[in-house]
Amino acid sequence: MFQKNNQVVTAILTTTGRKTGKSHSVKLRAVMYKGKLYFSRHKPDGDWFLNAIANPDVAVEFDGMKISGKAFVVKSDELSEKISQIKYPNEDRANEKRVVLAVTLYE
Protein backbone atom coordinates (compact mmCIF):
# COMPACT_ATOMS: atom_id res chain seq x y z
CA MET A 1 0.00 0.00 0.00
CA PHE A 2 2.76 2.47 0.89
CA GLN A 3 4.94 2.80 -2.17
CA LYS A 4 6.94 5.86 -1.14
CA ASN A 5 9.59 4.14 0.96
CA ASN A 6 12.56 6.42 1.76
CA GLN A 7 10.69 9.47 0.48
CA VAL A 8 9.45 12.72 1.93
CA VAL A 9 5.70 13.38 1.76
CA THR A 10 3.53 16.26 2.86
CA ALA A 11 1.02 14.99 5.40
CA ILE A 12 -1.62 16.28 7.75
CA LEU A 13 -1.22 14.79 11.21
CA THR A 14 -4.32 14.89 13.41
CA THR A 15 -3.88 14.38 17.12
CA THR A 16 -6.19 14.72 20.11
CA GLY A 17 -5.38 17.73 22.27
CA ARG A 18 -3.84 16.66 25.56
CA LYS A 19 -5.57 19.56 27.37
CA THR A 20 -8.70 20.21 25.30
CA GLY A 21 -9.52 16.73 24.01
CA LYS A 22 -10.29 18.33 20.64
CA SER A 23 -8.84 17.31 17.27
CA HIS A 24 -5.70 19.23 16.32
CA SER A 25 -4.41 19.02 12.74
CA VAL A 26 -1.10 20.26 11.39
CA LYS A 27 0.52 20.01 7.94
CA LEU A 28 4.06 18.61 8.18
CA ARG A 29 6.82 17.10 6.10
CA ALA A 30 7.09 13.43 6.90
CA VAL A 31 9.31 10.54 5.89
CA MET A 32 7.93 7.22 4.70
CA TYR A 33 10.41 4.55 5.76
CA LYS A 34 9.92 0.81 6.09
CA GLY A 35 6.13 1.01 6.24
CA LYS A 36 5.93 3.74 8.88
CA LEU A 37 5.55 7.49 8.68
CA TYR A 38 8.04 9.62 10.65
CA PHE A 39 7.68 13.21 11.82
CA SER A 40 10.54 15.12 13.42
CA ARG A 41 11.38 18.42 15.06
CA HIS A 42 14.23 20.03 17.00
CA LYS A 43 12.63 19.97 20.44
CA PRO A 44 9.86 17.89 21.98
CA ASP A 45 7.76 20.98 22.77
CA GLY A 46 5.38 21.19 19.80
CA ASP A 47 1.69 20.66 20.47
CA TRP A 48 1.37 17.93 17.83
CA PHE A 49 4.33 16.07 19.36
CA LEU A 50 3.11 16.36 22.95
CA ASN A 51 -0.46 15.48 21.93
CA ALA A 52 0.71 12.30 20.19
CA ILE A 53 2.67 11.23 23.26
CA ALA A 54 -0.34 11.82 25.53
CA ASN A 55 -2.75 10.08 23.14
CA PRO A 56 -0.99 7.93 20.54
CA ASP A 57 -4.13 7.29 18.47
CA VAL A 58 -3.65 9.61 15.48
CA ALA A 59 -4.84 10.07 11.90
CA VAL A 60 -2.67 10.94 8.92
CA GLU A 61 -3.74 12.31 5.53
CA PHE A 62 -1.45 12.08 2.51
CA ASP A 63 -1.70 11.09 -1.14
CA GLY A 64 -5.49 11.43 -0.97
CA MET A 65 -5.81 8.90 1.87
CA LYS A 66 -6.80 9.34 5.51
CA ILE A 67 -5.43 6.55 7.66
CA SER A 68 -5.56 5.90 11.39
CA GLY A 69 -2.38 5.00 13.21
CA LYS A 70 -0.53 4.61 16.48
CA ALA A 71 2.27 7.05 17.33
CA PHE A 72 5.37 6.43 19.41
CA VAL A 73 8.64 8.24 20.10
CA VAL A 74 11.69 6.79 18.35
CA LYS A 75 14.34 5.87 20.93
CA SER A 76 17.04 4.76 18.48
CA ASP A 77 19.59 7.46 17.66
CA GLU A 78 20.55 5.50 14.55
CA LEU A 79 16.97 5.49 13.23
CA SER A 80 16.50 9.17 14.11
CA GLU A 81 19.64 10.02 12.14
CA LYS A 82 18.42 7.97 9.17
CA ILE A 83 15.08 9.82 9.15
CA SER A 84 16.88 13.20 9.22
CA GLN A 85 19.13 12.15 6.33
CA ILE A 86 16.10 11.20 4.23
CA LYS A 87 14.14 14.31 5.21
CA TYR A 88 17.02 16.74 4.62
CA PRO A 89 19.26 15.22 1.92
CA ASN A 90 22.53 17.07 1.34
CA GLU A 91 21.69 19.67 4.01
CA ASP A 92 23.62 20.47 7.19
CA ARG A 93 20.48 20.08 9.27
CA ALA A 94 20.42 16.38 8.39
CA ASN A 95 23.13 16.04 11.05
CA GLU A 96 21.28 17.95 13.79
CA LYS A 97 19.84 16.04 16.73
CA ARG A 98 16.06 15.82 16.42
CA VAL A 99 13.19 14.14 18.22
CA VAL A 100 11.29 11.75 15.99
CA LEU A 101 7.74 10.48 16.20
CA ALA A 102 6.90 7.30 14.31
CA VAL A 103 3.38 6.38 13.25
CA THR A 104 2.40 2.83 12.50
CA LEU A 105 -0.41 3.12 9.97
CA TYR A 106 -3.36 0.74 9.94
CA GLU A 107 -4.23 -0.53 6.49
Image: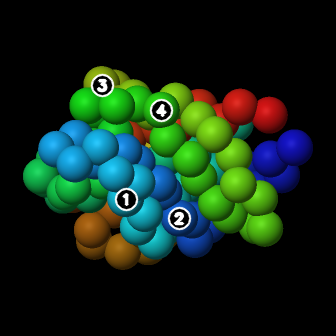
C-alpha span from label 3 to label 4: 19 Å
> What numbered label is drawn on residue 24?
1
> Could you tell me if the residues under marks 1 and 4 are in contact, i.e. CB atoms within 8 Å?
no
Q: In the image, residue 11 lies at what x, y percent?
A: 57, 65
Q: Tally the numbered discs.
A: 4
If you read the primary sequence from the N terminus, does the residue marked by circle 3 or circle 1 appear first? 1
C-alpha span from label 1 to label 2: 10 Å
> What numbered label is drawn on residue 75?
3
Q: Nearer the viewer, mark 3 or mark 1?
A: 1
If you read the primary sequence from the N terminus, does the residue marked by circle 3 or circle 4 appear first? 4
Q: In the image, residue 34 lies at what x, y percent?
A: 67, 36
In the rendered structure, which amino acid carries the disc numbered 2?
A: Ile
If you read the primary sequence from the N terminus, does the residue marked by circle 1 or circle 2 appear first? 2
Q: Residue at x 41, y 67 (%)?
A: 26
Disc 2 packing (10 Å; few <14; some 14–19; many ≥20): some
Q: Is residue 87 above or below residue 33?
A: below
Q: Residue at x 22, y 41 (%)?
A: 18
Q: Residue at x 58, y 71 (%)?
A: 10
Mark 4 lies on residue = 57
C-alpha span from label 2 to label 4: 14 Å
Which quadrant would the N terminus be assigned to in this image? top right
- Secondary structure under badge 3? loop
> Could you tell me if the residues under marks 2 and 3 are in contact, i.e. CB atoms within 8 Å?
no
- Secondary structure under badge 2? strand
If you read the primary sequence from the N terminus, does the residue marked by circle 1 or circle 4 appear first? 1
> What numbered label is drawn on residue 7?
none
C-alpha span from label 3 to label 1: 25 Å
> Could you tell me if the residues under marks 3 and 1 are in contact, i.e. CB atoms within 8 Å?
no
